[in-house]
Image (tube, helix red, strand yellow):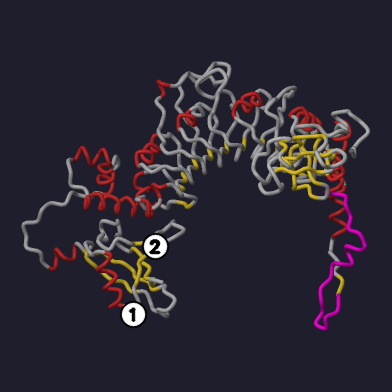
Amino acid sequence: MQSTSNSSDPIGQPETAFRVGQRVHFIGQPRRIGTVKYVGAVEGYSGNWIGVDWDADGEGKHDGSHNGIRYFTGRGPNTASFVRPHNLSTGISLLEALETRYRTTSTKEEEDEMYVLSTRNKRVSIELLGKDKIEDKLSRFEELMSASLSYLGVSFPGYPDQVRSKLPNLKELDLTGNLLADWEDVGIICNSLPALTALNLSNNSMSPDITSMPQLSNIRILVLNQTGVLWKQVEVLKESLPHVEELHLMGNELREISPVSSTVVQGFNSLRLLNLENNCISAWDEIVKLSQLPSLEQLFLNDNNLNHVWYPDCGKLDEPDDGYESHEKTFRPFKSLHGLSLGGNNIEDLESVDSLNSFPNLMDIRLSDNPVADLAKGGVPRFVFIARLAKVEILNGSEVSPRERKESEIRYVRLVMSKFHGPPEEIRRLHPRFDELKKIHGIEDEKPSTVTPGPQKMASGLISISLKCVGASMGEMPPLVKKLPATTTVGKLKNLCESFFKLKSIKPILYLQEEGSPLPTLLDDDMASLIELGIGNESTILVDELS
């Protein structure tokens, strides 16, 4: 069996023999990473074999069994392989990776392959201007402030004194996709880099057992995406990260937030940003456990399984312990939160949207890719969100201008007035801001008219809309501005467009183009009127063709 070292010092070099649980990559393919699950003989074949369960699906040939004999259990039907020891690497040190990434110079053969073809089909060599200067600057490790060592097979730190002397000014270190697993190695790396403030360990399969972690007082940003780290490990790490400001935990299959000694998460007094995207959290109760983080400004929860949002009752939460909380005697849940990303969840009720008004400082909200925002699933358009969310300044990544807010709120009130005629208390329950918005914009209730409709009455019910042809076979036509009754249905407007634009044998489809929306909204209900759809003055409707 091939060994990678003659030393068993866990700091200086990795162990020589393969062992179950060890992280490895295929020789020459540092992105093909897996975990050793078996070491020994395979019946019918000579010599020793290493059973590897690869991280990526489809990288293997079986599930850990061969010829009817099970040697180990792989993650899936095609994730496992038996590999000869000489075809696997147990990794290199941090400094070896640094040398590989920043001191590797191109060979004459490689430079000979850098050419373009002339008009006479002859090779013309390319010389990279400033190449020597760049290589010289990158090779002076003591001046490096940022280093990316992703997918180089780093599995251990090397000797701390050497790391410290060669990288005294390194502030940012990216170790994505390496072979690190032991938290003790992470602690050694951080302590060996006195200036380090940002560390990315994404796509390293970290051990669930955290021991011997020193104080990492300088770390401000820690990225642990797709590392398998769960919240119970975060609670242990918390004691070593007193000043961390950003914590990223994407893709770790997190299902719950599990505080150690309280019903809410305590500590993390400096944490401003928490990224929990692409996990498996389904209950908002778990998120409420984060409500007492005093400095939390941005919370990313995209692509989870959340189906309801609510603002917590202060009386039902534990008071923060004196050891963690500031000297303030009163507190409000999520008191510092100004950005909340909820895209790609299962939220379908408007009560969840309305509850966001209770968050004291929330201004930046993402709700895209939820049923409540999908018109095809009974969701509502952008202007309804703006009207219902009193404080939102950025919605789904687009700024809400004062003009868009005013127009959205007026459209929303008109929409409610046209569709709902029940008891006032029922309207207030379903539309909490309805009365407030009517007062803000001076909109009065419509009263039954005793006057026979005439030209003046008709004119007061007209809205001005811009019709713009965008169909490929419609040709170039200037936009038309028309004044139409607000009760005009989508089906009637389609017929009018055929007449306005002389569309022969073309069936039009209509879209509402709204300010701030990245895509226009399909108007597919022929029976719905313009006022019911919230279409107001100076709206733009795109006329396309049915393909």
**Residue bearing mark 2:** 513
Q: Earlier in the sequence, mark 2 or mark 1?
A: 1
Membership of 197 in magenta stretch: no
At 86% from the left and 56% from the top, the residue drawn is 133
Q: Between tags 2 and 1, which lies in front?
A: 1
Is disc 1 surrounded by few (<14), some (14 to 19) or many (20+) residues within 10 Å? few
Q: Give the image quarter of residue 88.
A: top right
Residue 275, position as x, y percentages in the image? 57, 38
Q: Is residue 469 above or below residue 533?
A: below
Is residue 192 left or right of 177 when viewed as pictured? right
Residue range (magenta) = 101-123
Q: Alpha carbon of mark 2 to alpha carbon of mark 1: how far?
A: 25 Å
Residue 16, position as x, y percentages in the image? 88, 33
Q: Give the image quarter of residue 434.
A: top left
- The extreme bottom residue here reads 120
Q: Is residue 451 above or below residue 472?
A: above
Q: Amino acid at mark 2?
A: Gln
Work out whether residue 454 can be spotted: yes
Q: Amino acid at mark 1?
A: Ser
Membership of 111 in magenta stretch: yes
**Residue bearing mark 1:** 505
Disc number for residue 458: none
Residue 415, position as x, y percentages in the image? 26, 52
Q: Give the image quarter of residue 496.
A: bottom left
Is residue 107 left or right of 431 when viewed as pictured? right
Is residue 66 left or right of 387 when viewed as pictured? right
Work out whether residue 364 can be spotted: no
At 29% from the left and 52% from the top, the residue drawn is 410
Secondary element type, mark 2: strand
Secondary element type, mark 1: loop
